[in-house]
Image: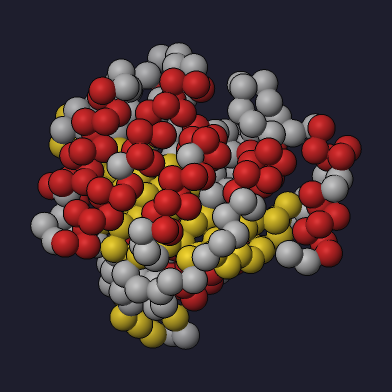
Amino acid sequence: MNKKFRSFMNNRKLCKSSYVDDGRHTLWELYKRFLKLEDGWSREVIYWQKSEIGDFPVLLFKTKKKGPALWVLSGIHGEEPAGPNALYENVHLLQSLKNENIPMVFIPMCNPLGYFRNWRYPNEYRDYQKGTSVGDSEHLLFNEDYHPRRIMPACDEADQLTKAVLKNINPRPPILSMDFHEDEDSRGSNTFSYIYSQGKMGVADPIAKMVVEILSGHDVLLQTNGVTRFGDTIVDGIVNASKDGSIDELLASNVIYKNNSMILKHPAKTVIVVETPSVGVPLEKRVMAHSEIIHHLEMFFHMAHEGY
Ligand SMILES: [Zn+2]
């Protein structure tokens, strides 16, 4: 890694001020652990998040092996620490997936500045009307009139993250993408969540159904039916919010908007967004639920690869 990254890692003062009140590991512990992925991997800083408190690097790891791949993303929202912390606990499993010759792309902390401050967005604590998501992909996705939903990327991070994703799709096309989140809707009195399945099978995806089973087995309370606050239908704890403008929609999409035209793109077969309620459940328990999903990634990958 370059000099700027090394001096970031040596910044003790910044290191000590990382948010830890909910029991999450510090940002530095996460970086140190993920950097253990060396043998058989290449890694790069895909962008620096700039802020008045410092610049934060976003790392992308990929196996040297190419081909139909497993993609793992987490940390898009900074106040959702269970995914990054479960990946921290289970880095050895990613290493063993690599040893099984499974091609992978791994972006464990898409919004390190948010994680560091416990802010949902890089520019905003929680307010979704003011905040810009690092995963926003609307500048590449179409509305019903075949125009992009947004003229410009929502923020610099969204521009850089979507570029990194598109650059890595051809050598390692995702057949399974797992994006670890927690549920913002759970704040306040609602302690129920649901997962998203944006691949071609939507709510009927067998991997999505198994993820629901795993979460239920960990006492994660799921809303099994009805509608989300965005009006999407929930079927057995699974939502297919196919038009939410997220990086997950981008991964699942078979077309994108680029240079004023529609370009075909490899659509990921199964795209899951894992969610756990983040209020009323200790972080340790949420991490255990996410960890069990990580333990199933090898099986899920083979399911996606061998067909359903
Ligand atoms: Zn989230």
7, above or below 193, in the image: below
The x and y percentages for residue 206 are 15, 46
Query: Residue at coordinates 37% horizontally, 50% vertically from top-left?
Result: 178
Q: Nearer the viewer, residue 171 or 239?
A: 171
Q: Is residue 154 visible?
A: no
The x and y percentages for residue 68 are 32, 69
Q: Is residue 259 visible?
A: yes
- Asked whether, in this view, residue 229 is left or right of residue 151, the answer is left
The x and y percentages for residue 49 are 70, 55
Q: Nearer the viewer, residue 192 or 216?
A: 216
The x and y percentages for residue 102 are 36, 62
State the quadrant of the N terminus: bottom right
- Asked whether, in this view, residue 25 is left or right of residue 7, the answer is left
Query: Residue at coordinates 48% horizontally, 40% vertically from top-left?
Result: 90
Q: Nearer the viewer, residue 232 or 5?
A: 5
Within the image, what quadrant is residue 116 found in? top right
201, above or below 21, in the image: below
